Amino acid sequence: MTIQRMEHVGIVVDDLAAATAFFVELGLKLQGEGPVEGGWVDRVVGLEGVRAEIAMVETPDGHGRLELTKFHAPSSRRGDRHAPGNTPGHPPCRIRSRRHRRRRR
């Protein structure tokens, strides 16, 4: 199984520096990092009062990007199945292949 194409994937993390270092160690290249906030971020994320730090890393071939985000505001609701998108690890992400199908929980 191989990934055929990846455009842009976002991952919410607790420790932006550690997550960035992890993906750089895997061979991705850091493209940039910095703070984001304001009305446009609120609209994109679907939350109000967003303040976050992001790091963008790119696959070696330049075709795929991973956006790592550490939210400072609003606060997240851990353990809540219906938590908003700023909750680290939520929603759960699974990669499926035709060879390894799993039933939904």
Image (cartoon, rainbow, N blue to C red):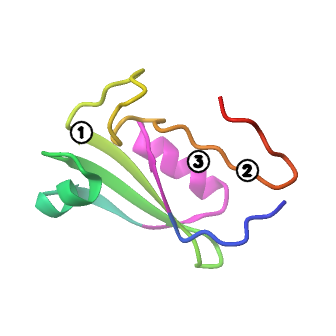
Tell which circle, 3 or 1, labels the residue nearer the N-terminal end: 3
Q: Is residue 66 left or right of residue 43?
A: right
Q: Earlier in the sequence, mark 3 or mark 2?
A: 3
Helix, strand or loop for disc 2: loop
- Tag 1: amino acid: His
Looking at the picture, which amino acid does disc 2 mark?
A: Arg
Measured in 3D between alpha carbons, the distance from the residue under mark 3 to the one under mark 1, in whole angstroms, is: 21 Å
Looking at the image, which residue is at 68% across and 49% down? 95
In the drawing, what numbered circle is on residue 22? 3
> Which of pointers 2 and 1 lies earlier in the amino acid sequence?
1
Label 1 environment density (alpha carbons within 10 Å; few <14, some 14–19, many ≥20): some
Depicted 67 relative to depicted 62: above or below? above
Q: Which residues are magenta?
A: 9-31
96 sits to left or right of 79: right
- Tag 1 residue: 72
Residue occupying the point 58% across, 43% down: 93
Q: CA distance from mark 2 to mark 1?
A: 31 Å
Q: Which label sits on residue 96?
A: 2
Dot 1: what SS?
A: strand
